């Protein structure tokens, strides 16, 4: 691993950020990742992060690609500010309850590639930029009214086997692992090292 020395002037430069301002209430988008909040536990926000566009959006949520391409901080922040968080509130202790939006979040989380969605929000999302140094850039967010997957998500066969074989454990692992679960089978972890 090659570490590069960071110079003070590189950190202190103000990055150039291109931010979309006009976000729609109804849109088609491609979601590269789900969102699972942490504040208000056990009642947390869950949702899907998606730019309001239908193309390859895997680079919107890929620190590995950002590093390999040596993307500047401004470009990364622009990508993150472009992701709309279509969310709702969910109690993590209701692990055995199902809901359409929860299932959508799980499908997005298991998918190998970004998933195409149709989303209707309760209100138009507004971007609120917080000028603090330690805050991860977040795009606009709004409560989801209706959402549906418009493509067939490609799920790795190994992930599919684990979910079918251990549905309760997979549900726990998809739910963000807030609570310690000593009874979880170690089998899903065996697949981790194989890709």
Image (tube, rainbow, N blue to C red):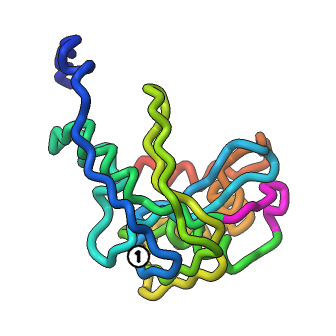
Q: Where is residue 53 in the image (x, y as percent from the top left)?
A: 33, 74
Q: Residue at x 28, y 57 (%)?
A: 59
Give the residue drawn at x 46%, y 88%. Answer: 150
| Quarter location, residue 30 | bottom left
Helix, strand or loop at disc 1?
A: strand
**In magenta stretch: residue 91:** yes
Residue 164 picture location, percent across and down: 62, 74
Residue 158 in the image: x percent, y percent? 46, 67
Using the image, determine if residue 123 lies above or below residue 63: below
Image: magenta residue range: 88-96
Can residue 37 be seen here? The reply is yes
As displayed, is residue 112 above or below residue 183? below
Q: Is residue 53 magenta?
A: no
As displayed, is residue 18 above or below residue 126? above
Look at the image and tell me whether residue 195 can be seen.
no
Residue sitting nearer the eye, 118 or 70: 118
Q: In this view, does 7 lie above or below 44?
A: above
Q: Residue at x 68, y 80 (%)?
A: 100
Residue at numbered disc 1? 29
Work out whether residue 20 or residue 32 is closer to the camera in this orientation and state it: 20
11, 100: nearer the viewer: 11
Q: Is residue 169 left or right of residue 183?
A: left
Image-based side of 98 in relation to 15, left or right: right
Quadrant containing the C terminus is bottom left
């Amino acid at each position: 691993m090659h570490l590069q020395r960071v110079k003070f002037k590189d950190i202190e430069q103000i990055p150039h950020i291109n931010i979309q301002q006009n976000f729609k209430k109804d849109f088609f988008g491609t979601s590269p990742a789900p969102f699972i909040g942490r504040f208000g536990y056990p009642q947390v926000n869950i949702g899907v992060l998606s730019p309001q566009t239908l193309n390859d959006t895997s680079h919107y949520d890929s620190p590995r690609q950002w590093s390999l391409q040596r993307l500047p901080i401004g470009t990364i922040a622009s990508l993150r500010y472009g992701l709309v968080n279509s969310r709702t509130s969910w109690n993590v202790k209701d692990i055995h309850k199902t809901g359409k939006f929860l299932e959508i979040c799980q499908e997005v989380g298991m998918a190998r590639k970004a998933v195409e969605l149709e989303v209707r929000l309760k209100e138009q999302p507004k971007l609120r930029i917080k000028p603090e140094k330690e805050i991860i850039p977040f795009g606009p967010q709004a409560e989801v009214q209706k959402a549906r997957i418009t493509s067939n998500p490609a799920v790795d066969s190994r992930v599919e086997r684990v979910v079918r074989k251990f549905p309760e454990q997979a549900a726990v692992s998809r739910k963000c692992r807030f609570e310690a679960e000593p009874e979880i089978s170690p089998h899903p972890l065996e697949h981790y090292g194989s890709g």
